[in-house]
Amino acid sequence: MTAKHSIGLRSYHSGLAAEAQVAQLYERRGNILIAQRWRGTSGEIDLILRDGAQVIFVEVKHSRTHAQAAEHLSARQIARLYAAAAEYVENEPLGQLTEVRLDAALVDGAGQIEILQNFAA
């Protein structure tokens, strides 16, 4: 295994662990996890949860600090998230009228989580 492959594998697994931590945090708050790593034609959404009638789309970013994690949210990625969320709600009973929220969950190297609700609004 090359060093580059090893680093990539480590990053992949730390990302999975961060997503699991964030999902547990939302579930402790009473939200219901309905999808993980949902993929549509527009892109992937890390976590999709329900809070009553509201659907919450969560992008999880893991880095050494919360600030570094936030830097990984590009305008292009946010646009893809909006498109993927719009695609997802097409199958909800209210379609595009579904109440939604886009959150960013920033996870630092110590495992501390910062939630930015409606970060792209």
Image: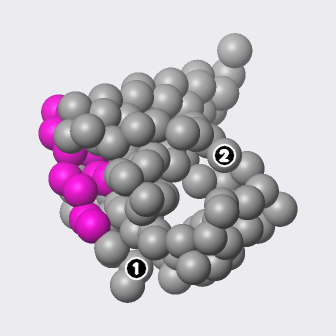
Q: Earlier in the sequence, mark 2 or mark 1?
A: 2
Q: Residue at x 23, y 56 (%)?
A: 115
Does the segment drawn in magenta span residue 113?
A: yes
Please tell me how crowded label 2 is: few (under 14), some (14-19), or many (20+) other residues with Cα within 10 Å: some
Q: Residue at x 65, y 27 (%)?
A: 5
Q: Which label was assigned to residue 120?
A: 1
Q: Is residue 99 above or below residue 30?
A: below
Q: Residue at x 33, y 42 (%)?
A: 31
Q: Which label was assigned to residue 9?
A: none
Q: Nearer the viewer, residue 44 or 108?
A: 44
Q: Mark 2 sits on what residue?
A: 38
Q: Position of residue 42 (x, y in %)?
A: 76, 67
Please tell me how crowded label 1 is: few (under 14), some (14-19), or many (20+) other residues with Cα within 10 Å: some
Q: Quadrant of residue 34?
A: top right
Q: Is residue 59 visible?
A: no
The N terminus: image quadrant: top right
Q: Residue at x 77, y 56 (%)?
A: 40
Q: Mark 2 belongs to which amino acid?
A: Trp
Which residues are the magenta region? Answer: 105-117
Q: How is the image coloured?
A: one colour
In the figure, is residue 45 to the left or right of 50?
right
Outermost top residue: 1
Q: Is there a contact, CB below 8 Å, between mark 2 and mark 1? A: no
Q: Mark 1 belongs to which amino acid?
A: Ala
Q: Is residue 115 visible?
A: yes
**Secondary structure state at the residue bearing disc 1:** loop
The span from disc 2 to disc 1 (Cα, nearest Å) is: 19 Å
In the figure, is residue 104 to the left or right of 88?
left
